[in-house]
Structure formats: C-alpha cells, structure tokens
Amino acid sequence: MDWLVSTYSHLVSRQHLGTTHEGRKIEALVIKEEASTTKPVIWLDCGIHAREWVSPPACLHAIDKLIENSNSVDPKQNLLAVYDFYILPVANPDGYVYSWESDRMWRKNRRPISGQQSQAPGFSGWGGQWGGGFGGQQTSSKCGYGVDPNRNFPTNFHQGSNNPCDDSYHGDQPLSEAESQAVQRGVQIMKSKYGEGKIAAFVSIHAYSQFWMSPFGYKKDHSKDYKDHMRVMKKSIDALASAYGTQFTYGPISEVIYIASGSSVDWAYENSGIKYSFGLELRDRGQRGFMLPQSQIQPTVQETWAGLTAMAIAIAPEFGITCSFRGKPIP
C-alpha cells in the first residue's frame, strides 16, 4: 500500500479507519481522479472473514485495474472518470494473519472473549454455514477468541448467534468490534465528503459459492428495490460469466443462502441508505472451497472485476451518468 500511495499519489491516497485488537491498522485506499464536480463513490471491502483468501486479491485487482485504466480512451474501462472508489483490501487483518500462521480455517477476528460458553458451535459460512467440516471443528481457541465482524452490524443484531464457540458469533453488542467499526467509519467518511445519496454502491466480497447477493439477509421480505437489484445483479453475473464461463447464482441473501442477521450488506442498505448494497461469494462451489488453488486466483479476480464493472455501468444513470462515459455511449 505504501508503494501504491507513493507511486500513484495523483490517484491513490490512504484512509485510516481503525486499529485492531492486536494493533494492526485497518486502512482503505481511496482511488480517484481529480474533477471539478463531486462524483458518486463506490465502496469495496474484502477479507472480513479471515479464511476467504481469494477475497483480498479481488480488491487488489480492482485497485490495479482502476490505476491501469485511468488513461484509457475506452469509456467502459476508466471508471475513475465517473466514480471515486474506497477500497478496503483486508477488513480483518488479525484474523487473516492468524489464518496464515496458526489455523487455516479461522474465520473471526482475534479479540479475546470473556464469559465463554461451551455449547456445540453452529455452522459457519457467509452467514455461518460453510466450513463446518474440515478445519471448522470446535476448539478452545474458537470459544475463547473472536467475533464474526460480519454479524456485528446493528441490523437485526439480536437474532444472531450469542455462542462464542460459533464461527458466526455476533459479539456482545452491535459494532463492538474494530473491524465493523472501521466499515462504519468508512461509510460515514464517504457520506460526510460526498453527501447523502452519493454512495453509488457498497460491495462486500467473500468466498465461496459463486453468489451475487442483495438485501435482505435477516428476513424473507423483498426490499423495495428488489427489481432494480435483480436487474443489476443479472447484468453483473452475465458480464462475469463472459470472462471464463463461471456461473453465479443471484438474489437476496435470505433466498440464495439462508437467514443471516447483523451483516454489513443489510446494514449498508437499511441503516445507511445505500441502495445498491451487495455481497459476493467468489469461486468455487465447494470442490476446493476455501482451499482454492493458486492457479484460480487470477481468473477469479478478472471475472470479478468484469462483474463489478458491469454493475457500475448499470447503476450509472441513477447518478446522473445518463448516456456516456467521457462523451461516448454506454452499450
């Protein structure tokens, strides 16, 4: 990140969002071209669940493509002409490091938990499901450490797991964790700088299962923006599939996976008023799961960027980008 900021100082700056329990910085990169008017802004975060190793590369690839295409004459490539980006490559750095050094299947953060319980843990994935088998077993470490930052947001928080042994343990109270607070702070900063209604999209990137999901997660009801969500997601997954043929399922979280309370996507949509709030689950569909081979990282991040680009173009008219990028029609 230091190299990016120093090398591309005309495009990239750093935004401090918080500090973890173990003292690591939580920082987003702000990618933007200077402009005479305030552009809408898009938020991307990756790595909020430690073991989802293909997620951070997706954010890093997005940063790379935004910088690489900043001088492109192709109106579909230079998204910086019409959007600013806040990108958080590793939202849970303590957990991420622990998954490399100690427990490959670690999901939560690493804050010690007092008053732990001893019940058997539930399943654990996006909402707590995936990973209940290999590497997902209950351990004393799992009971004594860690909150799932993606169950720590206020939206229907009380319905989440209160068992510290669960991979999806929601914590003592909403926004108790440095990681969820950092995401909240990022959104607050964007609102203060860009104004209400200028956050074009909030996208939280996970793995695995090949899903592109919208609110709601905590209830079965369709959101008031359901039709627009479905339209944009369809365009996004079609563009993603055009890269390598990877097929994604799309729809509301509660229908695509199951009921999941306290997620950042529901919070961004319902509490923060960001219409296009999405949760992505990247490759694969369980053949290798969290152990995705290194050979699949590059195609995964490339197809993800294709989907994100299509999303940005699909929602552009709602933010005053009605018919062109830099004067050229959007197909």
Image (tube, rainbow, N blue to C red):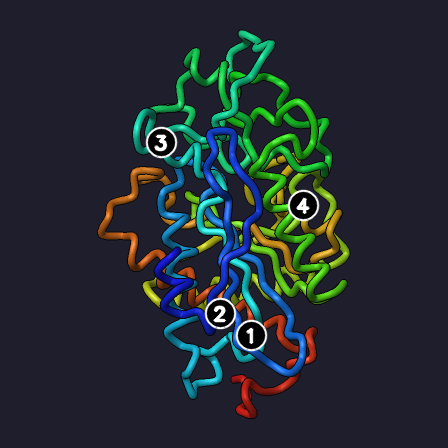
Q: Who's the residue at 53% across and 91% down the image?
A: 328
Q: Are marks 4 and 1 in contact (CB under 8 Å)?
A: no
Q: CA distance from mark 2 to mark 3?
A: 30 Å
- Tell me which amino acid carries mark 3: Ser
Q: Is residue 73 above or below residue 217?
A: below
Q: CA distance from mark 4 to mark 1?
A: 23 Å
Q: CA distance from mark 3 to mark 1?
A: 36 Å
| Residue 50 x, y percent position in the rendering | 42, 36
Mark 3 or mark 4, which has the lower sequence index? 3
The image quadrant that residue 181 belongs to is top right
| Residue 175 x, y percent position in the rendering | 67, 34
Instruction: Say what secondary structure mark 1 lies in.
Output: helix
Q: Which residue is mark 4?
A: 266
Mark 4 or mark 2, which has the lower sequence index? 4
Q: Are marks 4 and 2 in contact (CB under 8 Å)?
A: no
Left/right of residue 82 with respect to residue 136 in the rendered view: right
Q: Who's the residue at 38% across and 62% down the image?
A: 4
- Toward the top, the furthest residue is 118
Q: Which residue is mark 2?
A: 309
Q: Who's the residue at 33% across and 30% down the image?
A: 104
| Residue 31 x, y percent position in the rendering | 50, 66
Left/right of residue 222 with respect to residue 291 in the rendered view: right
The image quadrant that residue 172 belongs to is top right
Q: CA distance from mark 3 to mark 4?
A: 26 Å
Q: Name the mark nearer the viewer: 2 or 3.
A: 3
The answer to whether residue 81 of the structure is visible from this angle is yes
